[in-house]
Image (spheres, rainbow, N blue to C red):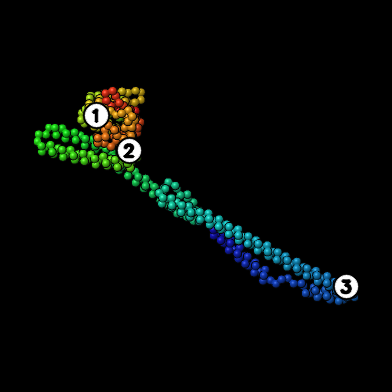
Amino acid sequence: MKKILVIYIALALVGIVATFFVFSHEPLMPDVVAIHHAVHTALESDSVQEAVTQQAEFLMQVFEEADTARRNRELVLQIFMLALILSFILIGILLYLYYKHKILTPFRNLQSFAGSVAAGNLDVPLTMDRDNIFGAFTESFDLMREELRTAKENEIKADRSKKELVASLAHDVTTPVASVRSAIDILRLKAQSENEINLLDAANKKLEQIDTLITDLFHSTLEELQELKVTPAEISSVEVSELIIQADYEKRIKPFSIPDCIIKADGLRLQQVFDNIIKNSYKYAGTDIVVNSIIDEEHLFIEIQDFGAGVSEKELPLITGKFYRGKNIEKTDGYGLGLYLSKYFMEQMQGGIYPENCDNGFMIVLTLKFA
């Protein structure tokens, strides 16, 4: 840009000096000495008419030469002024294009980039160009964007982890609460004084309050959380048996066995699946539970059956939906989340969950893929 400005100023000075030089000289006049000599020569002639004719021709020639010289000088001046004006226009255009390329366009890019960052769009990088006037700041601005994006991603991950933890703990706590409630019910049957019964009833009400608060907490967290983290790993069929036994805190499952195999599953999430299924059986059937298992070339099938009334065939495909509860269990407490979560966990472990009505009860079939 400095070079263009120097050229621009130099052309302006040349134009001013040349114009001053041209206009500072007087216009060309006929040669007086030559005219005097021509007049003297004509006077020496014997014929006056011939002398006048010669003098007139000479003067016309002199004035024509002077006029021609004047016109040539004016033409040169016009050409010079036109060239000077065109040079100024050309340099002005070059200056504008330079200003637009080096200043205006980079400034607009920075303005657009700042607006994008302010709107929360941190994925679009700022194009770096060290040749423009803002080149020294471009890299710093883009580094700022990268830092902001990293900070935002870390914040989202931290918030997500917190919600996952709250949702997981809130849902898992319902199982030990149910175990304590079952123990209180047994103690109430064995209580011998009215005072003991009243104390146990008060404890049971507090447990119901705790269960409601935990479920509300889980419910509100789940609304904000799109998915819960599932990390499948290799586990043995022996571990699967232990998970089922741990979920049966009322000891209603009859003796069972699972064929030896290695499956791919998340132990924590699979425990939640068994907890949900068996807890539903306690709540809605209240009968003994039978567990059967078979294997094929790729999967382990686990059948968990109770002897309750089951659900209607129309509702059967719907009970694994979010917040859905069957019409025949409207008087029983619940939020319709257990089977919904179980379905999600099983799908993330490349398995499945399938509810079925049996001739003498209701059954849930789980499929787990071999590792």
| Disc 3: which residue | 50
What type is the residue that disc 2 sits on?
Leu
Residue 184 located left or right of residue 362 = left
Residue 209 located left or right of residue 14 = left
Q: Which element carries disc 1, helix, strand or loop?
A: loop
The reply to whether residue 342 is visible in this rendering is no
The reply to whether residue 192 is visible in this rendering is yes
Q: Looking at the image, is mark 2 or mark 1 nearer the viewer?
A: 1
Residue 12 located left or right of residue 205 = right
What type is the residue that disc 1 sits on?
Ala
What type is the residue that disc 3 sits on?
Glu
* Residue 160 sits in quarter: top left
Distance between the Cα atoms at labels 3 and 2? 125 Å
Identify the disc placed on residue 285. Answer: 1
- 220 above or below 295? below
Instruction: Give the quarter of the figure containing the N terminus.
Output: bottom right
- 347 above or below 144? above
* Residue 276 sits in quarter: top left
Q: Earlier in the sequence, mark 3 or mark 2?
A: 3
Distance between the Cα atoms at labels 1 and 3? 150 Å
Q: Earlier in the sequence, mark 1 or mark 3?
A: 3
Residue at figure coordinates x 63%, y 65% from the top left: 15
- 232 above or below 221? above
Identify the disc placed on residue 228. Answer: 2
Point out residue 175 in the picture as x, y percentages from the top left corner: 23, 35
Point out residue 356 in the picture as x, y percentages from the top left corner: 31, 27
Point out residue 280 in the picture as x, y percentages from the top left corner: 26, 32
